[in-house]
């Protein structure tokens, strides 16, 4: 698989432990239409139309590949949309272990209006999965994780998935001593906290819903992250859109990484690119704050284009040089921050 696209270090090869398993329980078909001056009730031919496999985990996988990381995707695929997803991933060179489900995979429509600078999203709820299908996904996760260095769980889950599902997957990972990055929200996130995910990555709204209070930036965010670290989460990454992200590690204190001003086209997928950047930095054993900077650069690179996670390592490297880092108060005792990969 070549060399790391970012700084020339050898990139992981398939089959060795340097893979990342990415769980995408909500894989679907993403349609992106560009419609200038879009308004409800109108009739439009889009200025451009794109159809791709999507869902947060798939976006993360796409960004990981752009960063030169090896990965395996685990998820569901059903019906004609499922066949499209499998074919599209294959075409993109993304290795996937998809569980076939009886119901149709979902479609998400994203309408981008560059004139009014708006994004409108229509998100189908997704298939109802059966307990057998769910069990098969869990088995796939564990099996794949055994030959991976870490796992990423990204996004929502389809109907039929119990709210403890992500907690179960994290416990499975702990049993085989693999770190897990979790990007989920609401009950799936709240119920996963007792299972102690290694890393969580809520945006500010998601964090506020998790801790059930409004939070000031940065002090309230740092306080909430400190609480979560006390509950056993090793790293809390809070994304703030154009304001960047605040990250806190049990072993490395708190930091605020800020991106340069960019021209935002669509930030759909920025959170996913962010996760991929953090994971790539972890695989390369960069210090915590450098992983955070890389994550922020990836999120910004994503926001500059219409698609989700169609980033390039070259653009990420340019933006990375412009991401600033401020040390914030809080966090655990200061250790060698490069240690914080587990
Ligand atoms: N307009 C922007 N300019 C620069 N960087 C951005 C912009 N929007 C997002 N980013 C970067 O991407 C990261 C993630 O974005 P954001 O906070 O929007 O995530 P999110 O709400 O989780 O998004 P998603 O919908 O993908 O889940 C931010 O922390 C920031 O570093
Ligand atoms: Mg997000």
Image: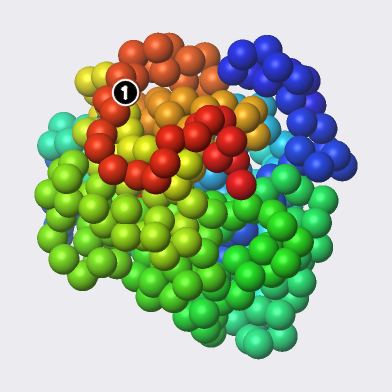
Q: Position of residue 37 (x, y in %)?
A: 15, 40
Quarter of the image for the N terminus: give it: top right
| Residue 75 at x, y percent in the picture | 65, 63
Residue 90 in view of the camera: no
- Which residue occupies the foreground of this view, 312 or 236? 236
Q: Quadrant of residue 80?
A: bottom right
Q: Which residue is mark 1?
A: 325
Q: Decide: few, some or many residues near mark 1? Use Cα within 10 Å; few <14, some 14-19, many ≥20.
A: some
**Does 210 sit above or below residue 160?**
above
Is ligand 1 within 8 Å of the beta carbon of the residue shown at mark 1? Answer: no
- Give the residue drawn at x 53%, y 70%: 195
Q: Position of residue 54 (x, y in %)?
A: 52, 52
Q: Is residue 53 left or right of residue 236?
A: right
Give the residue at the far right of this rendering: 15
At 48% from the left and 15% from the top, the residue drawn is 317
Furthest residue toward front: 333
Left or right of 67 in this view: 184: left
**Which residue is nearer to you in this view: 8 or 173?**
173
Does the image show residue 304? yes
Residue 34 screen position, x and y as percent: 31, 39
In which image quadrant can residue 2 be found?
top right
Q: How is the image coloured?
A: rainbow
Q: Secondary structure at mark 1?
A: strand
Residue drawn at point x = 87 percent, y = 42 percent: 15
Note whether 115 is above or below 27 in the view shown. above
Relative side of 302 to 1, left or right: left
């Amino acid at each position: 698989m070549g060399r790391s696209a970012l700084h020339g270090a050898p990139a992981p090869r398939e089959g060795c432990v340097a893979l990342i398993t990415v769980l995408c329980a909500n894989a679907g078909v993403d349609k992106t239409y560009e419609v200038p001056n879009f308004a409800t009730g109108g009739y439009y031919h889009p200025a451009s139309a794109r159809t791709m496999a999507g869902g947060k985990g798939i976006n993360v996988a796409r960004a990981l590949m752009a960063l030169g990381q090896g990965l395996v995707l685990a998820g569901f695929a059903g019906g004609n949309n499922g066949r499209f997803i499998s074919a599209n991933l294959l075409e993109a060179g993304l290795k996937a272990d998809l569980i076939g489900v009886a119901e149709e995979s979902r479609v998400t429509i994203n309408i981008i209006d560059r004139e009014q600078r708006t994004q409108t999203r229509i998100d189908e709820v997704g298939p109802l999965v059966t307990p057998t299908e769910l069990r098969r996904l869990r088995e796939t996760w564990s099996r794949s994780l055994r030959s991976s260095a870490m796992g990423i769980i990204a996004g929502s889950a389809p109907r039929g998935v119990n709210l403890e599902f992500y907690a179960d997957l994290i416990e499975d990972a702990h049993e085989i001593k693999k770190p897990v990055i979790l990007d989920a929200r609401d009950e799936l996130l709240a119920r996963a906290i007792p299972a102690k995910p290694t890393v969580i990555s809520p945006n500010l709204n998601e964090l506020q819903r998790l801790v059930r209070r409004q939070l000031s930036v940065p002090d309230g965010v740092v306080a909430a992250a400190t609480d979560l670290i006390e509950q056993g989460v090793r790293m809390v990454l809070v994304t703030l859109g154009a304001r960047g992200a605040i990250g806190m590690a049990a072993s490395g204190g708190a930091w605020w990484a800020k991106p340069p001003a960019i021209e935002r086209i669509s930030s759909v997928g920025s959170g996913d690119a962010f996760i991929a950047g953090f994971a790539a930095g972890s695989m390369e054993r960069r210090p915590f704050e450098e992983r955070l900077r890389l994550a922020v650069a990836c999120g910004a690179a994503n926001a500059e284009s219409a698609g989700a996670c169609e980033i390039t390592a070259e653009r990420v490297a340019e933006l990375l040089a412009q991401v600033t880092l401020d040390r914030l108060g809080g966090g655990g005792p200061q250790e060698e921050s490069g240690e914080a990969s587990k």
